[in-house]
């Protein structure tokens, strides 16, 4: 009779251990799946391959900045993410990342940023004709417009001051506020006899 009583208890114990093992396994999988992963990489200039210090990388609600060698590291959540990298004087770059793999804990994404392109056209304010060979001061650089009154700048940082003057005209100056490949029109005002 003793054997009959032990068998149901053994059966209950085995069922309890199986259920407990399943519950603990599910909890472990749940916490493992929610665990963050690490994203690392380098941000560099696509034209020169030089590292870009101070670039910003964004992934979901996380962000990081590059060090002097262009390296970055940041935690990221699991899931499908859109990464973006941006730096002053460069076009923004985005990249998709699928970080849902449960066994992968580290990801590497490098960004090759293209220098932005800004086209400046210097025109006469009255005639709207382009003004060729105009000296334009852009930050510390001096550049001259071509025969069509234009000049192209690369890697123009936000906040860079520029000024243009043609003899007999009023000086025009401005500050680059969004150097993202836009076209900039600079109108020179003729000075009247009483100015």
Image (cartoon, rainbow, N blue to C red):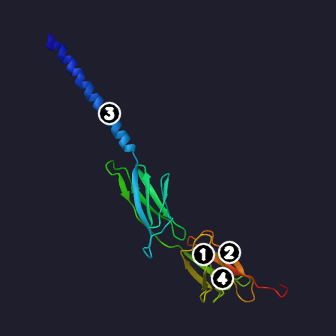
Q: Earlier in the sequence, mark 1 or mark 3?
A: 3
Which residue bears the numbered disc 3? 24
**Among the 4 quarters of the image, the one containing residue 120:** bottom right
Q: Position of residue 76 (x, y in %)?
A: 43, 52
Q: CA distance from mark 1 to mark 2?
A: 14 Å
Q: Earlier in the sequence, mark 2 or mark 4?
A: 4
Q: CA distance from mark 4 to mark 3?
A: 71 Å
Q: Is residue 94 above or below residue 161?
A: above
Q: Name the residue: 69% across, 77% down.
A: 173
Which residue bears the numbered disc 4? 122
Q: CA distance from mark 2 to mark 3?
A: 65 Å
Q: Position of residue 157 (x, y in %)?
A: 57, 71
Q: Name the residue: 20% across, 20% down.
A: 10
Q: Residue furthest right?
A: 194
Q: Earlier in the sequence, mark 2 or mark 3?
A: 3
Are the residues at dot 1 and dot 3 in contact (C-beta closer than 8 Å)?
Answer: no
Q: Quadrant of the C terminus?
A: bottom right
Q: Is residue 100 left or right of residue 16?
A: right
Q: Is residue 149 left or right of residue 6?
A: right
User: Few, some or many C-alpha atoms within 10 Å of disc 3 (few <14, some 14-19, many ≥20)?
Assistant: few
Numbered circle sitting on residue 174: 2
Which residue bears the numbered disc 1? 183
Q: Earlier in the sequence, mark 4 or mark 3?
A: 3
Q: Name the residue: 17% across, 17% down.
A: 7
């Amino acid at each position: 009779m003793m054997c009959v009583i032990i068998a149901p208890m053994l059966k209950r114990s085995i069922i309890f251990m199986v259920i407990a093992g399943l519950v603990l396994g599910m909890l472990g999988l749940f916490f493992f799946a929610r665990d963050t992963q690490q994203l690392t990489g380098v941000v560099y200039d696509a034209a020169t391959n030089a590292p870009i210090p101070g670039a910003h990388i964004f992934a979901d609600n996380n962000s990081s900045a590059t060090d002097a060698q262009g390296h970055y590291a940041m935690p990221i959540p699991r899931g499908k993410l859109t990464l973006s990298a941006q730096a002053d004087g460069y076009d923004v770059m985005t990249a998709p990342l699928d970080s849902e793999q449960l066994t992968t804990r580290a990801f590497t994404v490098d960004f090759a940023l293209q220098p932005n392109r800004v086209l400046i056209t210097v025109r006469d304010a009255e005639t709207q004709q382009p003004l060729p060979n105009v000296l334009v001061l852009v930050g510390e650089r001096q550049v001259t417009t071509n025969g069509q009154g234009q000049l192209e700048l690369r890697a123009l940082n936000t906040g860079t001051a520029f000024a243009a003057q043609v003899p007999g005209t009023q000086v025009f100056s401005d500050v680059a506020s969004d150097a993202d490949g836009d076209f900039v029109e600079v109108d020179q005002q003729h000075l009247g006899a009483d100015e």
